[in-house]
Amino acid sequence: MTKWQKNAAYALALYALSVVVLRFSSGGQGWGTALLLALVTTPLALWMGWLRSRLDEQAAEWGRRRFRPWPEERRR
């Protein structure tokens, strides 16, 4: 499976899960409303996941470039 296919499968699974959760939640949306709301929430959830991984990468990169050692490493 290529990276594009994995991403598409992940997005489709997230969309289907969102539809089911919105449809059968305690509020009980109709099918049409659940489909439309999931169409909005899926890209938002994917973007939030991408943003989190990007911030984690930047934090790890920043941690490697520190010019002073961490306090735990100074005590050694």
Image (cartoon, grey):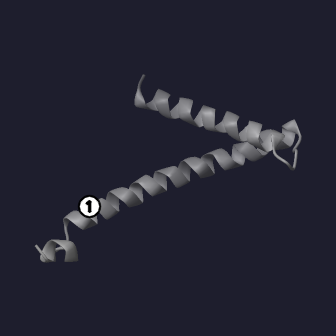
Where's residue 31, x and y in %? 85, 36
Count residues near mark 1 (Cα–Cα under 10 Å), then give few for <14, some for 14-19, many for 20+.
Answer: few
Name the residue: 13% across, 76% down: 74
Q: In the drawing, does residue 33 fall left or right of residue 47?
A: right
Q: Is residue 19 above or below residue 67?
A: above
Q: Amino acid at mark 1?
A: Glu
Q: Residue at x 20, y 73 (%)?
A: 72
Quadrant of the rendering where the C terminus is positioned: bottom left
Q: Which residue is mark 1?
A: 61
Residue at image location 61% in from the left, 52% down from the top: 44
Q: Give the quarter of the figure containing the N terminus.
A: top left
The picture quadrant where one finds residue 3 is: top left
Q: Position of residue 55 (x, y in %)?
A: 40, 60
Residue 22 drawn at (x, y percent): 78, 44
Place of residue 41 in the rendered image (x, y in percent of width and height, measured from the top left) = 68, 49
Residue 55 in view in this figure? yes
Task: Give left or right: position of 19 versus 67.
Answer: right
**Nearer the observer, 29 or 44:** 29
Position above or below: 56 against 23: below
Using the rendered image of the protein, determine whether residue 70 is visible from the camera's viewpoint.
no
Left or right: 1, with 18 as reference point: left
